[in-house]
Image (cartoon, helix red, strand yellow):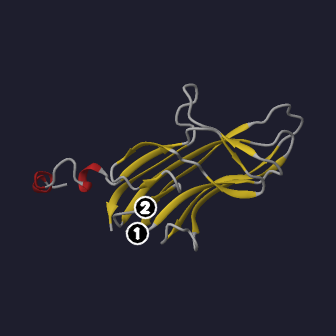
Amino acid sequence: MAITKLTADSITSGAIANTPSFAVLVGSTQVASASSFNVVNFDTVSFDSESEFNTTNKYYKITETGKYLIQVQIRATHDTNGQGYFGGALYKDTSSSFGSESIVAYTRMFTAYGAQTYNPEFIHTISDIISFTNGDYLRVKYYNGSSSGRNISATTADIPRCTSWSMMKVEGA
């Protein structure tokens, strides 16, 4: 980046500081319903440069068109002595009602176990750079392919940031 550009922009500008950006966490354990995509209950905001994360409806509103680095991790329990599909998904819509949402990233895994006496836990991650447009709405869901509810873990002192979502703009339109 040219010196003139550095002096023209302050360190807090989006061109240098990678804003907008945010990070959110799950503050209490959530039970994901069986055989369905479940909106992940990100209810704790670590930071949000534009105050666009809606903790009531669990979505983030894009305010600047550009490419964004996305980091999602979901810690969840899986079936004891069973098999199924599980995974995290990032959804996008042009409305906060998510009436015509579409999946833009999905990490699905198939698990198969034998003779466990415990519910194994896995971390499902999404890590990508994706282009978004001003006015896009994003939310994260977890697919539980089990025939029963599975826990999505909350942040605790022992397992900090185990279920988290963060994003930052890395490049303009």
Q: Element at badge 1?
A: loop
- In the image, taking residue 141 as reference, residue 33 lies left or right, namely right
Front in this rendered view, residue 88 or 156:
156
Front in this rendered view, residue 13 or 97:
97
Q: Residue at x 83, y 51 (%)?
A: 147
Q: Residue at x 51, y 53 (%)?
A: 56
- In the image, taking residue 62 as reference, residue 112 lies left or right, namely right
Q: Which residue is mark 1?
A: 135
Q: Position of residue 95 (x, y in %)?
A: 49, 71
Q: Position of residue 112 (x, y in %)?
A: 82, 46
Residue farthest toward the right in the current orientation of the protein:
115
Residue farthest toward the front in the current orientation of the protein:
56
Q: Which residue is mark 2?
A: 61
- In the image, taking residue 95 as reference, residue 123 lies left or right, namely right
Residue 113, quarter of picture: top right
Residue 69, quarter of picture: bottom left
Position of the C terminus by quadrant: bottom left
Position of the N terminus by quadrant: bottom left
Residue 79, quarter of picture: top right
Q: Position of residue 35 (x, y in %)?
A: 78, 57
Q: Position of residue 34 (x, y in %)?
A: 78, 53
* Mark 1 Cα shell of 10 Å, populated few (<14), some (14-19), many (≥20): some
Q: Element at badge 2?
A: strand
* Mark 2 Cα shell of 10 Å, populated few (<14), some (14-19), many (≥20): many
Badge 2 vs badge 1, beta-carbon distance below 8 Å: yes
Residue farthest toward the top in the current orientation of the protein:
158
- In the image, taking residue 55 as reference, residue 64 lies left or right, namely left
- Specify which label sits upstream in the sequence, 2 or 1: 2
The amino acid type of the residue labelled 2 equals: Lys
The amino acid type of the residue labelled 1 equals: Gly
C-alpha separation, residue under disc 2 versus residue under disc 1:
6 Å
- Which numbered tag is attached to residue 156? none
